[in-house]
Each structure stands twice: as C-alpha cells, then as structure tokens.
C-alpha cells in the first residue's frame, strides 16, 4: 500500500509572474470597458474644468471639518422648520400621481397662454357668461372644475 501524502508543496509564482498576470487582467478589463473608461475620463475632465473636482477633493480631505460646519449651519433655528418638513415633503411627493399632474399642468399652461393674450379692458356680461356655457370647451372645463371641487370636498 502507498503511504499517505503528508507534505503538500504549493506551486509558488514569482513576483514577476504575479505582476505580469495582474497587468494582463487590467489590460483585458480596459479593453473590454474602453467606452465606459473614455466617458469616465470625459466626465472627470468636465468636473475638473468646472472646479467641482477641487471642491470635492477638498471636502473629502477635510470631511470632519466640513461635516461639522454643515451640521452647525443646519442646527440653526431658521432651518429647523425646513428640516422637520423635509421628510413630510418626500412622503408627499411619493404619493403624487405624476401622470395626472402633468396632464393638468399642460392644460393649465395652455389656459394661461390664452388668458395672457386677453386685453385688460375686456368685460363679460351675464348673458355672455350663459352663452359661454354652451361652448363645449368651456363646459368641459367647468365640469372638470366642479368634479375637482366635489372630490376635494369629500
């Protein structure tokens, strides 16, 4: 019978081989991600030109001081109400139906454009008001407004 293996010799790579293997891995990763790396370089160049990179670099180097200053400013009484309402604002924004708001804002913007062309001297009589109710666009707007008010009142 054979004797059990008790001494395992690991194959050790020389430092030069490890260095070459690491370099090959990096070269392959750069080659595979060429477009992303070029975009990243372009982004860094843009951030550098605007001076933002220096600001972020300084902020990171002096983060303790910077955070202390920011927190000191935020703890002032004039900002306390804003900070208390900030979380409520985020929850409120999450509950909004953005598609409906966009639909109504487009209608509101169009209505404001038409209203801005009106002359200040124009007046509407009672009879013109009743005649306007026969106009389908005005009737639709008034009906929508009444439904809105009913829904708001519930």
Image: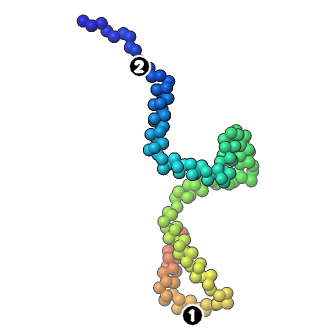
Q: Residues within 10 Å of mark 2 (few under 14, many from 20)?
A: few
- Give the residue drawn at x 74%, y 53%: 78
Judged from the image, the secondary structure of the residue bearing numbered disc 1 is: helix
Q: Nearer the viewer, residue 151 or 46?
A: 46
Q: Decide if residue 57 is on the left or right side of residue 25.
A: right
- From what the image shows, is residue 145 above or below residue 131? above
Q: Marks 1 and 2: CB-CB under 8 Å?
A: no
Nearer to the camera, 60 or 127: 60
Q: Is residue 148 visible?
A: yes
Residue at 66 percent of width and 54 percent of height: 50
Position in image of residue 68 (x %, y %): 72, 41
**Tag in front: 1 or 2:** 2
Residue 83 in view, yes or no: no
- Within 10 Å of the Cα at label 1, are there few (<14), some (14-19), or many (20+) other Cα atoms? few
| Image quadrant where one finds the N terminus | top left
Residue position for label 2: 11
Precedes in sequence: disc 1 or disc 2: 2
> In the depicted view, which residue is nearer to us: 57 or 154?
57
**Which numbered tag is attached to residue 7?**
none
Q: Which mark is residue 127?
A: 1
Residue 24 place in picture, x, y as percent = 46, 35
Q: CA distance from mark 1 to mark 2?
A: 101 Å
Please tell me whether mark 2 sits on a helix, a strand or a loop: loop
């Amino acid at each position: 019978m054979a004797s059990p293996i008790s001494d395992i010799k690991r194959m050790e790579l020389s430092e030069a081989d490890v260095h070459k293997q690491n370099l090959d891995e990096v070269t392959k990763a750069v080659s595979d991600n060429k477009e992303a790396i070029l975009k990243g370089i372009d982004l860094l160049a843009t951030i550098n030109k605007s001076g933002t990179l220096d600001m972020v670099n300084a902020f990171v180097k002096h983060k303790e001081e910077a955070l202390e200053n920011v927190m000191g400013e935020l703890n002032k009484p004039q900002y306390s109400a804003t900070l208390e309402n900030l979380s409520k604002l985020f929850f409120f924004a999450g509950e909004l139906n953005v598609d409906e708001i966009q639909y109504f804002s487009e209608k509101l913007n169009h209505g404001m454009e038409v209203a801005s062309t009106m002359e200040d001297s124009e007046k509407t009589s009672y009879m013109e008001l009743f005649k306007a109710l026969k106009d389908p666009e005005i009737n639709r707007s008034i009906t929508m407004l009444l439904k809105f008010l009913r829904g708001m009142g519930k």
